[in-house]
Image: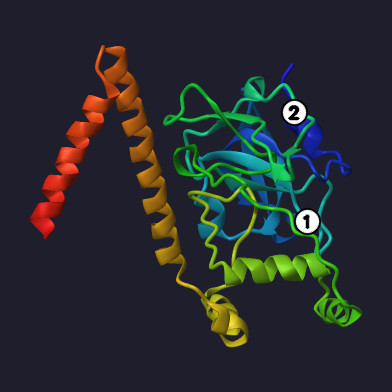
Amino acid sequence: MSFDVFAWATQSGANQTTVHNVRLIAVHPAEDGLVRMTIEHAGNTHELVGGSPFNEEWSRRDVGKVGYIVPASRVGRELPVGACHFRPYVDQSLQRVPELDSNDAACATVGGRRANIVGWICDTNPNGFRAPVGLIPGEGGQFVADETIEVTLRVPPEFVRECNRVQMSPEEVLRSFAGDLAGIHNFVVRPRADGYGSNGSDERDRAEAWLERAHGMNAIDLDALEQQRENAREKQYQRDDFAALLDDFEDLGGNADDLFAAVQALVDKQAKGNA
């Protein structure tokens, strides 16, 4: 039996439910200046109250699109029971497919990272793929996987007081700063599973300036260091290839000393050319 979106929409306690694969058919003005939406879900149509003020241009721009419905937040005004928002998928070929969900759907994280357990399909991935719970994939089903690492930090009460001043927890403040310092852009066409983003270009610039001002004397050239590591890895690959070549030579009946002599001759020739 498919989920009854209409029964859900009239329940005031369903404040965490998201309903996917919904098509917006039409929008009309409703009482109190809100929107009344006609939607289609699982072959059925119904009218729901939207949680946003009616604006003809903004309200009707998504008519005909497929997306999902989330409960409207009752912040700043009283809303009717069942009021909700329609959010279109960035990729209109996207479809939520519960049958493709991971069998271990109860495990939302693996090693502290958000796990890919929710099933989807789209034109680019017709055989299906999985994404973390709560993440809506972007264009072509794209998203940035969660590669975060866990850090445990004890903070002083003075820092906690500053966080309280802006009505945020220490975790929220540190997370916000990390997004700015890392220069993270969280685009809807390729959303991040870790949820990180920055607060804007000015914030990114100031976070970078702070790091340079406070700790720039310890800075190293990461690009050069990474290139050195890449060169070292390439050298190791070549050594491994040469060892495999020696094994093949011996398997074919060759003598290892003959191969070494041939290589030594090439080395000697190269040395004379550089003299």
* Residue 229, above or below 169: above
Where residue 119 appears, x then y in whole percent? 62, 28
* Residue 229, above or below 25: below
Label 1 crowd (10 A; few <14 / some 14-19 / many >=20): some
For the residues marked 2 and 1, what is the alpha-carbon distance in whole angstroms? 27 Å
Task: Name the residue nearer the viewer: 134 or 130.
Answer: 130
Callout 2 touching callout 1 (CB < 8 Å): no
Amino acid type of the residue tagged 1 in the rendering: Ser
Q: Looking at the rendered structure, which numbered label has been put on residue 73? A: 1
Q: How many marks?
A: 2
Where residue 133 appears, x then y in whole percent? 69, 39
Amino acid type of the residue tagged 2 in the rendering: Ala
- The residue at which mark 2 appears reads as 105
Q: Quadrant of residue 8?
A: top right
Where residue 144 appears, x then y in whole percent? 54, 47
Q: Name the secondary structure under disc 2.
A: loop
Q: Is residue 206 visible from the viewing direction of this image?
A: no
Q: Quadrant for the N terminus, please.
A: top right
